[in-house]
Image (tube, rainbow, N blue to C red):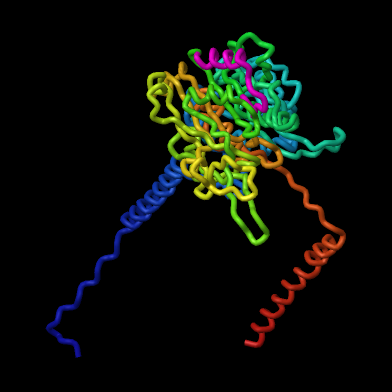
């Protein structure tokens, strides 16, 4: 029984309605504040991931490096009709430029068939007729128009049947962007008339260099040193693409005069089979001496002697030319000769010349003098360590990039087949592009170059078509139906 002396416990008072309403209102306000705060933070600080195969919606590192250091505002207009096949891919590409342009890149889509008023305004502002679809890029008073057909490479055939083979939008846009921001195209002169491994190989090298030029905003012109009195004054660089025959004393004099100027640049691709003692002597005076050997690996196997001339190479991780490639290995096709580099030469120091290695062979290779033997063996006269395959030379080096306009730069490679179409590797193309940009004093463009987006066709036989038809039309639906019936039967039995 309850104790009569015990006092009954007091019932807690019910909360008043206004306090309940205040509590609910406060919770709603805090929820809204949290919701809008998270959205605001996610809008300003967010990360995007490209989950597409081959990262097809991600800009190359060369383009990203350039956009990171962009110093001027740029306006880009996508003047391609919205119902055109290239509109979607082009607009997505341009949005990547806007998102990575640190607020300096403005992008607008103007359909010339629907946005007539805005198209007329763009014509007036740029002075362009806009009589065809494409992309307009403007920086200050400089304007560049990229026609729609410049964004793609089509297959051979009639006009109505030429399907798109490759999409090269990033190449075209980045090149035009460099042009309107930095000025006119640079000029490289490529030496001809001194032979090559084959005429076809020389043509392939020129085509590959031309493709790089379209992407990196420079033009390529042939030059025969026997027909000129001096290297043109507008030459930003000189390319020697695997000369088979040596330069004459007069031509070497032209080369020395050009190199001794206030600002010059050279890319020298050596053909190991060429007879070029004067050119080798000129390179030796600048700290790079071709050894006239062959970098190879040889071994005795059960099938006889085996010689391997294609060289596995690694890139230097300290030079600005190859730092972005240091994690990659490459293969040099054909034959390669090693380079002797003079790092501590007093003459070079007095001339202000700095030599730096760019590429070296892996450990199993050596520089063999007697490479014609059936089974060469590394001997005392051969280069057995420090097998350098490429090097850079800079005269008048200054730490501050802005003050390097008066430095002379040269890249020497002991292989002339880097850009052969049959054996070309993307990493070798990136190395050549980085070398050319370094020669032009454009370190901000050094990086992995844009890769074309290619379309592929899958050829199926009649039998394969039949298998796909029956599998997708009957087998897969029947399998799903059987699984469903089994689940239904098991539930009824339970």
Q: Nearer the viewer, residue 400 or 303?
A: 303
Q: Quadrant of the N terminus?
A: bottom left
Which residue is at a point 85% across and 36% down the rendered structure image? Answer: 157
Which residue is at a point 74% across and 36% down the rendered structure image? Answer: 83
Counting from the top left corner in percent of width and height, residue 327 is at 49, 45
Q: Is residue 261 left or right of residue 2?
A: right
Q: Quadrant of the C terminus?
A: bottom right
Give the residue at the far bottom of this rendering.
1
Q: Is residue 58 left or right of residue 27?
A: right
Examine the structure image and report whether residue 252 is included in the region drawn in magenta: yes
Which residue is at a point 47% across and 38% down the rendered structure image? Answer: 323
Counting from the top left corner in percent of width and height, residue 77 is at 63, 26
Q: Which residues are magenta?
A: 240-260
Q: Nearer the viewer, residue 96 or 360?
A: 360
Q: Quadrant of residue 346?
A: top left
Report whether residue 398 is seen: no
Counting from the top left corner in percent of width and height, residue 142 is at 59, 16
Q: Is residue 197 above or below residue 394?
A: below
Examine the structure image and report whether residue 233 is included in the region drawn in magenta: no
Give the residue at the far left of this rendering.
5
Q: Nearer the viewer, residue 123 or 277?
A: 277
Counting from the top left corner in percent of width and height, residue 113 is at 75, 27
Report whether residue 186 is seen: yes
Q: Is residue 147 left or right of residue 383?
A: right
Q: Nearer the viewer, residue 307 or 239?
A: 307
Give the residue at the far top of this rendering.
229
Q: Quadrant of residue 213?
A: top right
Q: Is residue 75 left or right of residue 148?
A: left
The count of marks equals: 0
């Amino acid at each position: 029984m309850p104790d009569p002396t015990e006092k009954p416990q007091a019932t807690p008072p019910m909360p008043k309605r206004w306090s309940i309403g205040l509590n609910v209102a406060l919770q709603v306000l805090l929820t809204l504040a949290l919701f809008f705060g998270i959205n605001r933070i996610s809008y300003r600080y967010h990360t995007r991931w490209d989950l597409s195969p081959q990262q097809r919606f991600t800009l190359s590192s060369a383009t990203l490096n350039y956009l990171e250091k962009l110093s001027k505002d740029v306006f880009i207009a996508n003047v391609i009709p919205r119902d055109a096949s290239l509109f979607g891919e082009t607009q997505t590409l341009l949005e990547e430029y806007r998102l990575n342009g640190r607020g300096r890149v403005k992008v607008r889509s103007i359909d010339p068939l629907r946005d007539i008023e805005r198209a007329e305004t763009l014509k007036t502002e740029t002075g362009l007729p806009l009589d065809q679809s494409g992309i307009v890029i403007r920086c200050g008073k400089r304007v560049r128009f990229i026609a729609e057909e410049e964004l793609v490479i089509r297959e051979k055939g009639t006009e109505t049947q030429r399907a798109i083979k490759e999409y090269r939008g990033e190449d075209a846009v980045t090149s035009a962007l460099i042009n309107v921001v930095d000025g006119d195209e640079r000029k490289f002169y490529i030496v001809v008339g001194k032979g090559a491994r084959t005429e076809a190989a020389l043509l392939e090298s020129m085509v590959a260099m031309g493709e790089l030029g379209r992407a990196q905003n420079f033009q390529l012109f042939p030059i025969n040193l026997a027909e000129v009195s001096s290297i043109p004054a507008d030459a930003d660089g000189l390319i020697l693409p695997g000369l088979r025959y040596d330069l004459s004393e007069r031509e070497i004099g032209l080369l020395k005069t050009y190199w001794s100027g206030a600002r010059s640049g050279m890319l020298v691709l050596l053909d190991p089979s060429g007879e070029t003692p004067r050119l080798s002597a000129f390179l030796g005076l600048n700290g790079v001496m071709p050894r006239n050997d062959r970098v190879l690996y040889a071994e005795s196997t059960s099938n006889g002697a085996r010689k391997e001339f294609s060289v596995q190479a690694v890139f230097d991780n300290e030079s600005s030319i190859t730092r972005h490639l240091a994690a990659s290995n490459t293969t040099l096709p054909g034959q390669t000769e090693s380079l002797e580099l003079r790092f501590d030469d007093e003459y070079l120091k007095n001339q202000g010349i700095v030599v730096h290695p760019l590429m070296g062979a892996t450990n199993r290779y050596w520089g063999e003098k007697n490479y014609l033997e059936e089974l060469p063996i590394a001997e005392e006269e051969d280069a057995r360590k420090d097998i350098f395959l490429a090097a850079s030379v800079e005269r008048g080096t200054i730490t501050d990039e802005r003050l390097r306009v008066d430095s002379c730069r040269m890249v020497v490679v002991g292989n002339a087949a880097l850009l052969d179409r049959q054996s070309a590797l993307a990493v070798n193309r990136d190395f050549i592009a980085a070398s050319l940009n370094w020669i032009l004093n454009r370190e901000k463009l050094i990086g992995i170059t844009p890769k074309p987006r290619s379309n592929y066709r899958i050829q199926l036989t009649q039998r394969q078509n039949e298998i796909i038809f029956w599998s997708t039309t009957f087998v897969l639906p029947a399998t799903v139906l059987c699984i469903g019936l089994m689940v239904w039967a098991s539930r009824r039995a339970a």
